[in-house]
Image: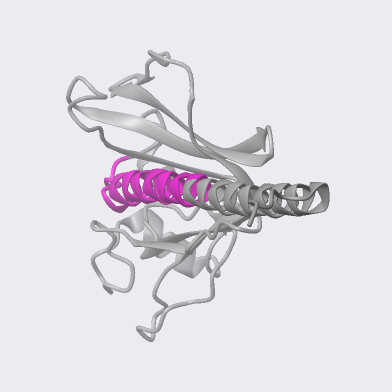
Amino acid sequence: MSARGFSLIEVLLATALLAAGLALAFGIVQGAGRASVSAEMLSAHNDRLRTAQSFVRRQIASALPQAIDPAAGFEEVRLLRLGANRVEFVGEMPGYLGRGGSYLQVFRLVPGQNGSALVFEHRLMTPDGPLKAERPAEVILDGLADARFSARAFGPDGRPEDWAERWDRLGQLPSQVRLTARYSEPRYRFPTLTIPLRYSLSGATGLAPEAARRNDDDGGSQ
């Protein structure tokens, strides 16, 4: 009996099945590659976010009971100034960023490439006031939306007050500072950053300076 070869239809069918199998395998490999790249990008983003939030938390938590403006009189001493887009205070810098001593430190929310950017600047404090900035403001985080600072203190009854997007009380640090935001990119999440201030005397009756007590006599924050 003579050997029978493959017909043209059989060859075409086998070729089509092989091409379909290769296309399916290529799609699976390509999808796995995209998933891997996406996971790596998300992991890198989370690492940057944790590092940035840790830095912001450490600096604000260590705000010193030191006047922002050394030239202000005793009854006009402000230890921290806060608005929805800015927080300003005096504190020490990490060794790799500063030269020792206290610095006027400012975190600001400014328009960025993909939303708002959180930038940080610092100037060395002297008895005559802060010196000129040694370096330009640095971007800590970018791509934020609906970002805002707020602060609160303990009231006379020992209970925390409501969060307020303004703090300029005389002679007093708030008990907590908060940064709320979301990312413009829906995949990313921004955990609310609530920071207790280490040197705050908010709620400690009788320990606040005369300037802080004057706030209460005037009816609270200005």
Which residue is drawn at the image coordinates 30% and 56% (left, top)? 209
User: What quarter of the picture does the C terminus occupy?
Assistant: bottom right
In this view, 144 is above or below 139: below
Q: Is residue 217 magenta?
A: no
In the picture, measured across the screen, residue 33 lies left or right of residue 175, that is right
Q: How far across and how far down the image is residue 73, in percent? A: 39, 37
Q: Residue at x 47, y 55 (%)?
A: 169
State yes or no: residue 41 in magenta: yes
| Front one among 167 and 49 | 49
The secondary structure that dominates the magenta segment is helix
Q: Residue 207: x percent and y percent?
A: 23, 65
Q: Quadrant of residue 203?
A: bottom left
Place of residue 78 in the rendered image (x, y in percent of width and height, measured from the top left): 42, 45
> In the figure, 140 relative to 173: above or below?
above
Span highlighted in magenta in the image: 37-66
Q: Nearer the viewer, residue 152 or 15?
A: 15
Colour basis? one colour
The residue that appears at 48% across and 39% down in the rendered structure is 107
Q: Residue 165, how many percent across, how many down?
A: 59, 59
